[in-house]
Image (tube, helix red, strand yellow):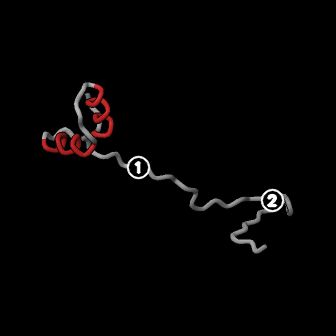
């Protein structure tokens, strides 16, 4: 079974062991059973998007950063 210590803790508790997540982590670390951490995939943002209107006043844009009421 390939899973981390957070998923292994309730599995062992259902099997009848009195164990918490800290003990499960220590046991899995000492036996080299921990999985490597997953890297978050970064978002790809539009870097240089330039609109090309075909006629005047066909594209109107507004960017409001802050408003005072």
Q: Earlier in the sequence, mark 1 or mark 2?
A: 1
* Horizontal side of residue 65 vs 11, given as left or right: right
Are the residues tagged 1 and 2 within 8 Å (C-beta)?
A: no
Relative to the observer, which residue lies in front, 15 or 55? 15
Picture residue at 43% right of the left edge, 49% below the top:
41
Q: Is residue 57 above or below residue 39?
A: below
Give the residue at x 80% y 59%: 59
In the displayed structure image, the side of residue 68 where residue 46 appears, left or right: left
Residue 61: x and y, percent? 77, 63
What label does residue 68 carry, if any? none
Kindly report the distance in space between the C-alpha atoms of the residues bearing marks 1 and 2.
Answer: 36 Å
Nearest the camera: 29 or 66? 29
Pick the quarter of the image with the N terminus. Answer: top left
Q: How many marks?
A: 2
Residue underneath mark 2: 59
Q: x%, y% of residue 46? A: 58, 57
Examine the rendered structure and indicate whether residue 5 appears above or below residue 41: above
Residue appearing at x 28%, y 36% in the figure: 9
User: Residue at horizontal 32%, vertical 35%?
Assistant: 7
Q: Furthest-left residue in view?
A: 31
- Mark 1 falls on what kind of element? loop
Task: Kindly identify which residue carries mark 1.
Answer: 40
- Of residues 8 and 62, which is closer to you in this image? 8
Q: Is residue 46 left or right of residue 50?
A: left
| Image position, residue 27 (x, y; %) | 17, 41
């Amino acid at each position: 079974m390939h899973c981390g210590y957070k998923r292994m803790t309730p599995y062992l508790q259902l099997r009848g062991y009195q164990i918490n997540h800290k003990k499960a982590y220590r046991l899995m670390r000492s036996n080299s059973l921990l999985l490597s951490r997953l890297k978050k995939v970064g978002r790809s943002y539009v870097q240089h998007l330039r609109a090309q209107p075909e006629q005047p006043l066909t594209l109107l844009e507004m960017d409001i950063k802050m408003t005072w009421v």
